[in-house]
Image (cartoon, helix red, strand yellow):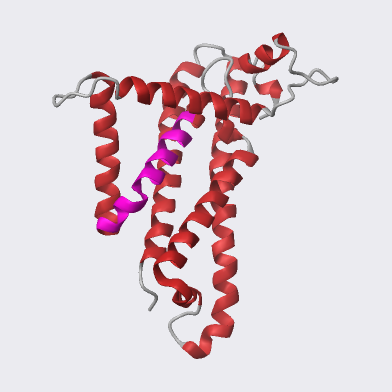
């Protein structure tokens, strides 16, 4: 994300304090990478805190995460069946990670890693490789039938279309998330310039909802791609 939208980025300033900057004064590590690491560190600390004292009657962080994870797991199993439990840990991690990255841009001095195309493209490539891996693992060479269409004599025409369609999924996943989060940050920056408090506070709640929706959309599409890979080709 352009530094002009966030005049003071806390991790950038920290890098300068420790001398980890180049001759041009810019951080030696890309901003989206720094803030991705920060999100990961926060999630690890929160997970350790939530599981430090597990009790039969959950409360506090344990109660919140049991509700969140349980709801997401029920949704995945409802749509994918019991096979969904095999991939649920990855899907759940993606949702939580993307949500926290999205929210990062709403924190003063912070930045949203998902407002950078490199981050969203990396996530999209991972999902593409992951569901292809499961398709090949479950069906072996027969997995190619997913790309051949329902009638064998149409295969020469269907095959290239299907291959293009699968690669287009990466483009769709990455651009949708990137465009929405980048647009959100731009709008917030412009509103803050025009009316610092009056206009931005209500929009924070709207964009918080949008952050949740975008994380869930990525999660849901990833689940549907995996569901398709799990199914037998017709």
Q: Residue furthest left?
A: 57
Answer left or right for 182 relative to 139: right
Q: How many marks?
A: 0
Residue drawn 55% across and 65% down?
Answer: 165
Q: Position of residue 203 (x, y in %)?
A: 47, 23
Residue 206 part of the magenta-drawn span: no
In the foreground, 116 or 130 = 130
Give whichever of 151, 231 is nearer the camera.
Answer: 231
Region rendered in magenta: 82-100
Q: Measured from the top left, where is residue 56 in percent x and y?
A: 14, 26
Q: What residue appears at the point 51 percent right and 11 percent down from the top-left corner?
A: 197
Q: Quadrant of the N terminus?
A: top right
- Residue 204 at what x, y percent from top left? 46, 22
The residue lying at 70 percent from left, 9 percent from top is 17
Residue 161 placed where, x, y %?
57, 73
Task: Say if residue 213 shows up in the picture.
Answer: no
């Amino acid at each position: 994300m352009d530094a002009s939208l966030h005049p003071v980025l806390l991790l950038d300033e920290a890098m300068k304090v420790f001398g980890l900057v180049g001759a041009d004064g810019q951080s030696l590590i890309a901003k989206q990478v720094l803030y991705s690491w920060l999100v990961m560190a926060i999630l690890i600390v929160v997970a350790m805190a939530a599981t430090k004292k597990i009790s039969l009657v959950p409360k506090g962080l344990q109660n919140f995460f049991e509700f969140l994870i349980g709801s997401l797991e029920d949704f995945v199993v409802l749509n994918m069946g019991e096979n969904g439990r095999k991939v649920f840990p990855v899907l759940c991690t993606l949702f939580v990670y993307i949500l926290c990255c999205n929210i990062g841009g709403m924190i003063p001095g912070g930045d949203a890693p998902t407002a950078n195309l490199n981050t969203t493209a990396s996530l999209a490539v991972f999902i593409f490789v992951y569901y292809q891996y499961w398709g090949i693992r479950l069906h072996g060479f027969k997995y190619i039938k997913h790309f051949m269409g329902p009638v064998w004599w149409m295969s020469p025409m269907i095959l290239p279309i299907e291959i293009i369609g699968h690669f287009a999924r990466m483009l769709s996943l990455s651009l949708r998330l990137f465009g929405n989060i980048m647009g959100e940050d731009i709008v917030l920056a412009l509103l803050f310039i025009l009316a610092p408090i009056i206009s931005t506070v209500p929009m924070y709640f709207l964009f918080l909802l949008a952050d949740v929706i975008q994380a869930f959309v990525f999660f849901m599409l990833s689940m549907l791609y995996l569901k398709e890979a799990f199914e037998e080709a017709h």
